[in-house]
Image (cartoon, grey):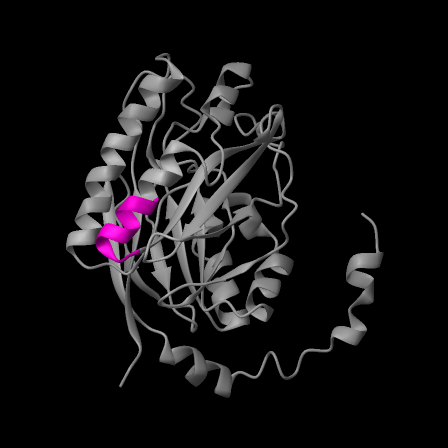
Amino acid sequence: MARIVKCGLIQTRCELSGNESVEKLKEHMMEKNLKLIDDAGQKQVKILCLQEIFYGPYFPAEQEVKWYSATEKIPEGPTIKLMQEKAKKYNMVMVVPIYEEEITGVYYNTAAVIDADGTYLGKYRKNHIPHTHPGFWEKFYFKPGNLGYPVFRTSYADVGVYICYDRHFPEGARILGLNGAEIIFNPSATVAGLSEYLWKLEQPAHAVANGYFVGAINRIGHEQPWDIGEFYGTSYFCDPRGQIVAEASRDQDELVVADLDFDIIREVRNVWQFYRDRRPETYDEMVDLLP
């Protein structure tokens, strides 16, 4: 019998002016996402991932200390506690990306992973932090991750997380595969004209090179007051052959759902023996060479 797991991705837009209080913006985005989370539960989704820092706009479009107040503790904060209740209610694994406070002044771009019984399994902290393009001032907000590339053994699959800019780095994607990931979720915030041409190249390439599924999530719309570009949605799942098997629209709040056959992983890896044929003893230069 095939091992088929129904998985879901949620993409949403922030429709407010961006000048509201941090609390008001969080309320707005939480309300939107909670409706779609309930929809996922009713559709019996078994693994669900939200978009990058799902409960607010993409505030690294500016550098303002007020956004530090958007941070929460993990797992003690109210958002993760609420999502634990949702996970338990719907018997649904959840990947929940938020702005994490470790201690005052030390903040991370983080995704918490919650098992289907509501148990907090752990977190991934974004390792690669951009500060390169106008409107992507992330080093002002996020310390680089320090937890490596963990894989979470959930009730339905072994789950890895890579966040947004991480997807440009194949090294971590490989480590996630070596650590046993069957599916990688990449919650993102990326705009047209910058990296859209890479959106459907890099992540299917990771899927092929590592023989796992990928769920890629992007927010939607033009967020005010910055309007750094169009967040173009098109969240999707691709399989270990790099084929896109389900895709969301470009401009709608949406839950995209796919029935993923995890038995395909064995089938693909038995054909493409990339793990067997690796030569790690020849790769020292990869880490020794600078920059």
Magenta stretch, main secondary structure, is helix
Query: In the image, 100: left or right of 254?
Result: right
x then y, percent, for residue 255: 24, 48
The residue lying toward the viewer, choosing from 62 and 65, is: 65
Residue 152 visible somewhere in the drawing: yes
Vertical arrangement, residue 260 with respect to residue 84, above or below: below
Q: Position of residue 173 (x, y in %)?
A: 57, 60
Q: Nearer the viewer, residue 7 or 242?
A: 7
Using the image as rendered, state which of residue 121 and residue 203 is in the foreground. 121
- Examine the rendered structure and indicate whether residue 278 appears above or below residue 219: below
Evaluate whether residue 252 shows in this view.
no
> Where residue 9 sits: x, y (%)?
31, 51
Q: For the N terminus, which image quadrant?
A: bottom left
Which residues make up the magenta segment? 84-92
Position of residue 287 measured from the top left corner of the image (x, y, whole percent): 79, 58
Q: How many marks?
A: 0
- In the image, farthest residue toward the left: 42
| Residue pictured at 84% horizontal, 55% vertical | 289
Residue 282, by quadrant, is bottom right
- Residue at image point 59% right, 79% down: 274
Against 118, residue 5 (above or below) is below
Q: Is residue 89 magenta?
A: yes
- The residue located at (42%, 85%) in the rendering is 267
Magenta stretch: residue 169 in it? Answer: no
Q: Is residue 96 above or below residue 133?
A: below
